[in-house]
Amino acid sequence: MKNIREFDGNSKNVYLNAVSRKADEDLRLRLKGISMGLGYQYDIYDNYFNTGKLGLLQRNIGFSNSSVDIQSLYEYNSVSIRDLREAIEKNIPATVRYTCQYCTVTPAESFDHYLPKEEFPEYAIHTNNLIPCCKTCNGYKSYVWRNFVGMRLFINLYRDQIPDEKFLFVEVIDEGNGEINFRYYLDNPYGIDYQLFRLLESHFERLRLLERMRKKAVGIISELENSFITSKMPIDEIIAVVIETAERNFESYGSNYWKSIAEISLVKSPIFLARIQ
């Protein structure tokens, strides 16, 4: 999980550009008619966004009658959104550009509206409200994004600083009959800020990340077994190579990358080593 650098351009210009591309003249006129009021709402969003108070932002019901019109601007495969997607992707390091950073498990192939467009249609194409993610995370996140006291339930990849400290761990489990499995879990032995760690716990729970990581990690077992079996290197040297490669991937994907954690835990596990010796 890595932070994403926000869009460099102007959200209001993105809105006006999307409006200008609409073929329906009446729709264009209606959307232009609310552009000044919407621009003011964008300023409010930016203020809450920049001060870390998004959880307290309230919908402006004055845009209820324009909800359908505004949401029509968000079409994932439209030219406007495609151009925006490419601009945001350029801000993401190439190594993780096409991987969902909500989970680091699945390719990023959609935008998450951090503030759901159903509740906040006025921010349907606000650039800082659109976060690249996979369809699985998008579906799990859905429209419930905060609790009843305004505490956010998901990491905002633009604004919440992802900790460098390790908080994701895995246990290698012997299931018997020659089967190995994993148990991923969160812990805070290195003193991550309490509120941030609670947010991480909520994020992982609601996106089913521990189970999704476990299922994905099972495939690593046979991959590593084959590496040990086919390599002519001594076992100790293979282990060193696996650990070195995994640690390099921490640099790209973050210090809590599920795959690297599983690889290192496997090659250090007596359960796994007993299978290959």
Image (tube, rainbow, N blue to C red):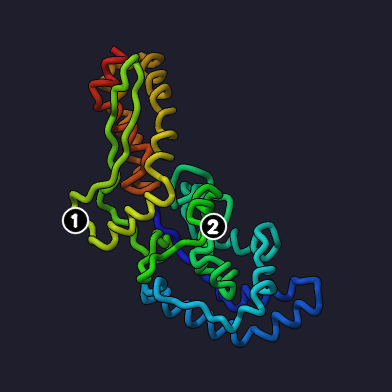
Q: How far separated are the C-alphas under marks 1 and 2? A: 32 Å
Query: Around disc 2, counting alpha carbons within 10 Å, would you say few (fewer than 14), some (14 to 19), or many (20 or more)?
Result: some
Q: Name the residue at the front extreme.
A: 148
Q: In the image, residue 23 lies at what x, y percent?
A: 80, 71
Q: What amino acid is at disc 1?
A: Gly
> Does residue 90 show up?
no
- Earlier in the chain: of badge 1 and badge 2, it is 2
Asked if 23 appears above or below 255 in the picture, the reply is: below
Query: Within 10 angstroms of label 1, few (less than 14), some, or many (20 or more) residues?
Result: few
Q: Residue 88's mark?
A: none
Residue where numbered disc 2 is placed:
89
Label 1, secondary structure: give it.
Answer: loop
Does 233 sit above or below residue 167? Answer: above
- Is residue 25 in view? yes
Image quadrant where residue 84 sits: bottom right
Instruction: Name the image quarter holding the C terminus.
Output: top left
The residue carrying mark 1 is: 191
Q: Nearer the viewer, residue 221 or 145?
A: 145
